[in-house]
Every structure is written in C-alpha cells, then in structure tokens.
Amino acid sequence: MTKPTLSAHFAVLREAGLVRAAKSGRNVTYHLNADVLEDALNSLMEDYLFAWTPPDDMESVAHGIVESLVRQDFAAVTRDFDAELAAALPVEKLESAWVKTVDIFGPFVKTLETRVERHWKHTTVSITCEFARAQLDVHVKFSRGGDISGLLILGK
C-alpha cells in the first residue's frame, strides 16, 4: 500500500474513534482505542444475538454474598466461586480479609446502592456498603458462565 492510501485508511479509523494518533516530527504513531472497539463488538454481537445475557438474579446473588459476609458464613460466599478464584481466595483467607475489614472500618451497618456494569466477558455488581467508619464498595464479578470470578472490597 502507498503512504497516501494508508493515511486515508487511518483517517477513517481516527474519525471513528478506533485509533488515536500521536505525531512526532514527520512520524505518526497510531494507538488502538480498545474501549471503542469493545463497544463496537458488543453492539455487533447483540445485533446477532451472540452476546451473553446475564441471569436476572445476579443482583440478588451479589446481595446474598454481602449478607453471607455479614453473617460470617464464608463457605456460602465461596460456594459459587470459579476454580481460579476458589484457589486464590479460600474460605480461611476470605474470613481473614473480612475480619480485618471490620477491624479497620467498624461493623457493617447497611447496604446503600447497587450498580451493575456489563462488559463483554463479565458483569460486575457493585454494592456500596456503610460500615461504622466508612463506605466501601463490594464488587462481585460474574463470568459469562454465571460463576463468581472476582470479589473485591474497595474504599469509595
């Protein structure tokens, strides 16, 4: 391909937001904008019914995780972990992390709000929880198969 032809193709990709250009002297370096590409792929897959649609009860499962943590029923929390998360976060490690969280931020008070973020390969349900001394987000990440593939407790 000639340089003018390449430039014309990259101009179209740049206008579509799929690439970003960084000019340095006479050279132009293009970087893929993965977020736009992911959104485009999601849209295409949804049009052809290839996209994964998470189960309707995902929010209630995530709330059940929080309730089990509060009850200190750590075996119930880990029951639906995928193999990778189960190996990384066994019951004893989860219990230790929860006890440290409560020691630092005080006892759990209540849940405040729930947000669902759907991505191409997973869905994350984030529940804002009020503790005695802080608000924390509990993020429950669900794989395409519906297993829990991530669990994070983060400060707001």
Image (tube, rainbow, N blue to C red):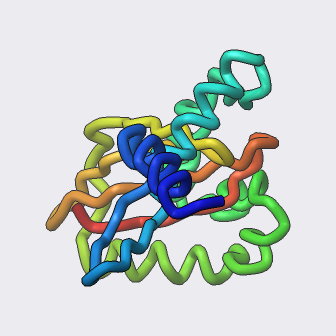
Please name whichever residue, 151 or 45, is drawn nearer the observer in this view of the structure.
45
Quadrant that contains the N terminus = bottom right
Q: Farthest residue toward the right?
A: 83
Q: How far from the left and from the top, in percent, is residue 125?
A: 49, 43
In depth, the one of 68 and 33 nearer the eye is 33
Tell me, yes or no, if residue 70 can be seen here: no
In this view, 140 is above or below 99: above
**Which quarter of the figure has residue 26?**
bottom left
In the image, residue 106 above or below residue 112 = below
Q: Residue at x 21, y 58 (%)?
A: 135
Quadrant of the rendering where the C terminus is positioned: bottom left
Left or right of 9: which side holds 22?
left
Residue 101 in the image: x percent, y percent?
A: 36, 75
Q: Decide: is 27 above or below 58.
A: below
Residue under the image location 49 percent in, 79 percent down: 97
Q: Nearer the viewer, residue 13 or 118?
A: 13
Question: Does residue 4 show up?
Answer: yes
Residue in the image at 39% along x and 44% along y: 17
Q: Return the x and y of residue 35 as percentages of the image width and height.
A: 47, 50
* Residue drawn where x is 56% and y is 45% of the image: 38
The percent coordinates of residue 23 (x first, y second) are 28, 73
Image position of 140 (left or right of 11): right
Left/right placement of residue 53 relative to residue 115 reads right
Horizontal side of 46 relative to 154 (left or right) equals right
Q: How many marks?
A: 0
